[in-house]
Amino acid sequence: MKADRVRKVADLANRRTRERFGRFLIEGPQSVREAVTWMPDSVRDLYVQAADGPDGPRIAGETLTSIVERSQEHRIYVHPASEAVMRRISPDCQGIAAVGDADAVRATAQGTQLPEKPFVAAFWQVRDPGNAGTVIRAADAAGCDAVVFVDDCVDMLNPKVIRATAGSLFHIPVMTMGVDEFFGWAGEKVLRTIAADVYGTDGREPRELPEALRDQDLAGVGKAVIFGNEARGLEPGLLGRCDDIVRIPLYGKAESLNLATSAAIMLMSMAMSSHIGTM
Amino acid sequence: MKADRVRKVADLANRRTRERFGRFLIEGPQSVREAVTWMPDSVRDLYVQAADGPDGPRIAGETLTSIVERSQEHRIYVHPASEAVMRRISPDCQGIAAVGDADAVRATAQGTQLPEKPFVAAFWQVRDPGNAGTVIRAADAAGCDAVVFVDDCVDMLNPKVIRATAGSLFHIPVMTMGVDEFFGWAGEKVLRTIAADVYGTDGREPRELPEALRDQDLAGVGKAVIFGNEARGLEPGLLGRCDDIVRIPLYGKAESLNLATSAAIMLMSMAMSSHIGTM
């Protein structure tokens, strides 16, 4: 493979390169497998480690072979490459990487038909790629129908985000919206907006999560739970526009929970309680 | 301050040095403040950034000053140091670090009187320092009465563990035990042992968490929830010795949750459900 091409692919780790070419990088067996399985139309090229054999290149190992086989049912170009080339594409890719089409991912997210009473996880100004990926994974585990990144968040196609989602980026539509757009969209979909926040506003104390979980008004409706920035939480102006404010009770001496942990606890508790409610 | 002393303190980042001297390093305002507040008898020396002034060294800033004041009610030696020295002690310490006494921390943990029906979080072979710290913080938030590191875990006095606990290491007793010792201790304390595990054993399927939460037998008793290694989970032999096996349901397409997320969800759900039960 030409050095120029390898460099271009590796360069997709940079936001500017992603924006310029409308492409992004998917690294490692788990992410590539989930992309090929759940969003094959978003995958353009697949790079896989192979050794030269008497009958042409031999793909290294069963895991990689099965991913390549799955990709061949779709219009994905498979490029066998040496171990050294794969390492140059991405040092962490464990023998397999793919190039995705950013517009196709966005179109899939925008085009997803949400169910009648959707369960949405929204994040305002999430900035750390590891956190962003982890919260997408938590939203997926909780059975959320969509994730919305509100306002100025980290690029969801950053390779560190994708790695931290452990494939969940390809399971669940992830949309990006401004603040007004988010509240407009939530209104249109008749979603109850629930701020996850420890402090609330001057006039409004947050309700404790266990109490909110027993509230039938919350269980039986479409809802969007919105979480704030890692350091600053949610702005008062934004809190004021939400229908509810809910906080996770702290029973010990810990002063706080981090964003990823809070999101996992709140989304999963709501999921468990509404699944019990409908059993 | 003598270069030799600075090097010795910085060297506590290494396990071997910690074991040799029985000392460990506490870095940053949050951890040092919590140590000085909740386990002052475990803190020996405090290093704080100060500038030379006409009347002697002046401590840099209100946050650091208030921690130093708090420490002075106890037998803690305060050493003012230059910014350069503080950076050599620990690049991440934000102007304050302390040296703790490992035996004193262990004695505090062993000597803690548990309540009648304690809620214990146990971790088998947790290896990653960030995970270990995060799960201690989650156990603290859930109001657990103790944490037990079972078998061959990361050293809880590793600076990365302490940083990830965000002060919780000094809020909650953390004990270390072998497997047999753990089950012996749980028997003695009449704890129901609950394995957090996705697969269960050949003869025994895990129960789903929401079902387990509604089980009054689980809510009203002393219990120890045990979580497995990051990659391998819990061994069948160990699962076989537990009274219950419980798993977190996955409602979306995510295949799994990581250890820190699972622990936070399970411990906090149990805490919320038992606090409701006793309201």
Image (cartoon, coloured by chain):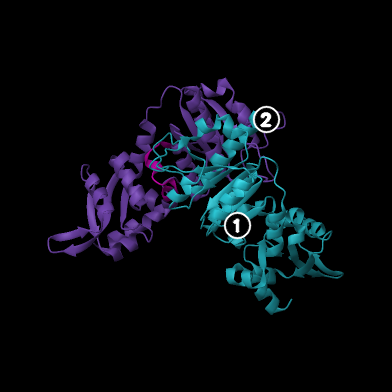
Chain colours: A purple, B cyan
Quadrant into which the N terminus of chain B falls: bottom right
| Residue B278 badge | 2
**Can residue A70 be seen in the rendering of this structure?**
yes
Q: Is B109 displayed left or right of B262 in the figure? A: right
Is A2 part of what is drawn in magenta?
Answer: no
Q: Is A125 displayed left or right of B110 in the figure? A: left
| Residue A111 badge | none
The chain identifier of the residue carrying mark 1 reads B
Pointer 2 with pointer 1, Cβ within 8 A: no
**Can residue A126 be seen in the rendering of this structure?**
no
Task: Report the magenta residues as a range.
Answer: A162-176
Tell which of B63 and B72 is nearer to you: B72
- Specify whether disc 2 shares its chain with disc 1: yes
Residue B14: horizontal and vertical position, in percent?
58, 69
The relative height of residue B214 versus residue B159 in the rendered view (above or below) is: above
Disc 2 residue type? Answer: Thr
Q: Residue at x 68, y 74 (%)?
A: B6
The relative height of residue A177 versus residue A70 in the rendered view (above or below) is: above
Residue B70: horizontal and vertical position, in percent?
81, 56
Within-10-Å neighbours for mark 2: few <14, some 14–19, many 20+: few
Tell which of B157 and A156 is nearer to you: B157
The chain identifier of the residue carrying mark 2 reads B
Q: CA distance from mark 2 to mark 1?
A: 30 Å
Residue of label 1: B176
Q: Residue at x 58, y 27 (%)?
A: A213
Q: Using the rendered view, name the quadrant where residue A39 is placed.
A: top left
Disc 1 residue type? Answer: Thr
